[in-house]
Amino acid sequence: MATPKIVLFYVFAPLADPEAIRLWQYTLASTSNLRGRIIISPHGINATVGGDLPDVKRYVRGTREYPAFKNADVKWSDGTGDDFPKLSVKVRPEIVTFGEPSRVRVDDSGVVGGGAHLSPAGVHELVTRRGDDVVFLDGRNEIEAQIGRFRGAVVPAAQTTRDLLRLVDSGDFDEYRERPVVTYCTGGVRCEVLSALLVDRGFAEVYQLDGGIVRYGEEFGDEGLWEGSLYVFDGRMSVDFSDNPTVIGECARCGNPTKNVANFPDADGRDLLVVCGECAPE
């Protein structure tokens, strides 16, 4: 019986012909029987796709044959076999929609001027040295942080990634400009841009969690600084790093503890809400 897997990866690299890359990626993914979302832009690629293990391996091998993507940091996780409704491969101005692509500078080494990459162990070492002076800044949408986040993290009031740009520009985080700031997000892609925006605004010591929450959970599970579940952008809605995660979410309807995120008020809507199974729509 085939084992379903999901892969998540991004690469920031200048792409002279995003449309050609889109056509190639669509052919590679569709002939590998994969479903999911792939975004191509002049800045690079951002992909989350899933399928049977042999098919996913074939797709990853093919993607890494392209020189700019050969060192892609691919994160693997277990799928259910029905995690995405279809395959979508699109060209957009940005691989993460902050809303101002001209403010993102990319060269062959990635985003120019971003924060220093810290491994999960490096984050622990920083916290050991600097203690409560370290600020964890959540680079995701507010709804994602409701079911899981780093302990004591600053959670911006952001409904979209565009909101993060607005909050940075309006000075909402300026009180942390002289403190070590560790940005984090699901797989790391949003923090590549967010950390660069903070550096550009004059923040003195900016880091980004290398590989994002996914890589941190692989290394430390629920035994480190993370608590709760990780929201994911597919049919699973959330994943855990152990069999006994702390449940920090609260149902918006009844207040009971839950890690469940659902489309609300109806199952076909686009609005998300933390809502328990009893209160969620069918």
Image (spheres, helix red, strand yellow):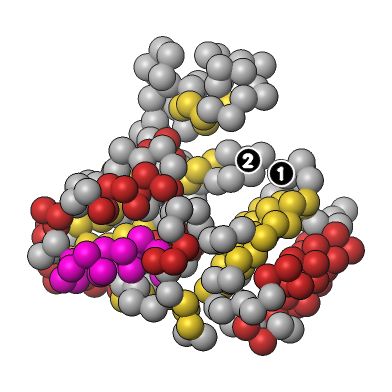
> x, y (%) of residue 23?
80, 67
**Quick check: is 203 in the magenta stretch?**
yes
Q: In the figure, 219 relative to 226: above or below?
A: below
Decide which of 178, 187 is in the foreground and name it.
178
Start and end of the magenta stretch? 192-210
Measured from the top left, where is residue 62 in percent x and y?
A: 78, 77
- Quarter holding residue 198: bottom left
Per the image, the residue denoted by label 2 is 236
Above or below residue 181? Residue 24 is: below
Q: What type is the residue that disc 1 sits on? A: Asp
Q: Tag 2: Cα neighbours inside 10 Å, few (<14), some, or many (≥20)?
A: some
Q: Earlier in the sequence, mark 2 or mark 1?
A: 1
Q: Choose between 71 and 190: the one closer to the eye.
A: 190
Q: Mark 1 sits on what residue?
A: 83
Residue at 80 percent across and 56 percent down: it is 34
Q: Are marks 2 and 1 in contact (CB under 8 Å)?
A: yes
Q: Residue 117: name its quadrant.
A: bottom left
Answer yes or no: is residue 74 visible.
Answer: yes
Quadrant that contains the C terminus: top right
* Residue at x 68% of width, y 53% of height: 37
| Neighbour tally class for label 1: few under 14, some 14-19, many 20 plus, Cα within 10 Å | many
